[in-house]
Amino acid sequence: MADRVDMGQELRISFDTPEHGWLAIYLDSGDHHLEVPFSHTPVDFLSELVRALLNLSDGVDAEANCSYNPDRYEFRFRARDPNSQFDIASYPDYKNAEATGEVIFSFEGVALDICLAFWRGIRELQGRVSPEEYEEGFHRDFPEKETGLLTEKIKASGGVRR
């Protein structure tokens, strides 16, 4: 079971460069570090993740799933006031929806701060890798439309300057 990260810690998210249908997300907060590699199949994780962040920014609970065969990782966002909860649960078999997951990363903080951390990582990836390079390396289209919507929501919330 993962230790819950203190609300005083900053959440930092980054991604590596997509290659051969694989990508990894790196999560850091204080002395908690986690690398989660994932495949382009069976789901489009980055698109699911951005949609989950859009839901969180609206105060709605959401999830995004990714696969590192045979493991499945569930990124769970729970909108709460004043602080929201973000967890990653690891499941030993992505095909078994009934399996019990083990929480391997947990963070509590303001929903906007959680969204901002992910948004910064996604935008850094978007700025570093062209849409063509992303599609060639990850075998999926980059979720540009969804990322644009998230950018506008964050700007409207005062998270970044226009």
Image: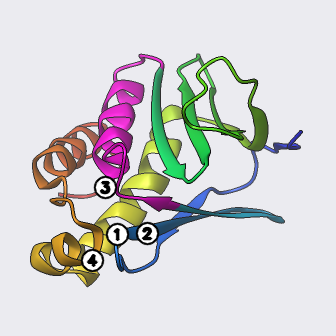
Quarter-wise, where is residue 4 in the image? Answer: top right
Q: What residue is pinned by disc 2?
A: 23
- Image mark for residue 154: none
Residue 46 counted in the magenta span:
yes
Proximity of marks 4 and 2: CB atoms separated by less than 8 Å: yes
Counting from the top left corner in percent of width and height, residue 69 is at: 56, 54
Secondary element type, mark 2: strand
Q: Nearer the viewer, mark 3 or mark 2?
A: 2
Left or right: where 89 falls relative to 142: right
Quarter-wise, where is residue 9 in the image? Answer: bottom right
Q: What residue is pinned by disc 1?
A: 21
Label 1 sits on what residue type? Gly
Q: Badge 2: few (under 14), some or many (20 or more) residues near its Cα, within 10 Å?
A: many
Q: Residue at x 33, y 39 (%)?
A: 48
- Image mark for residue 160: 3
Q: Badge 3: few (under 14), some or many (20 or more) residues near its Cα, within 10 Å?
A: few
How far apart are the two marked residues, 4 and 1, measured between alpha carbons?
Answer: 6 Å
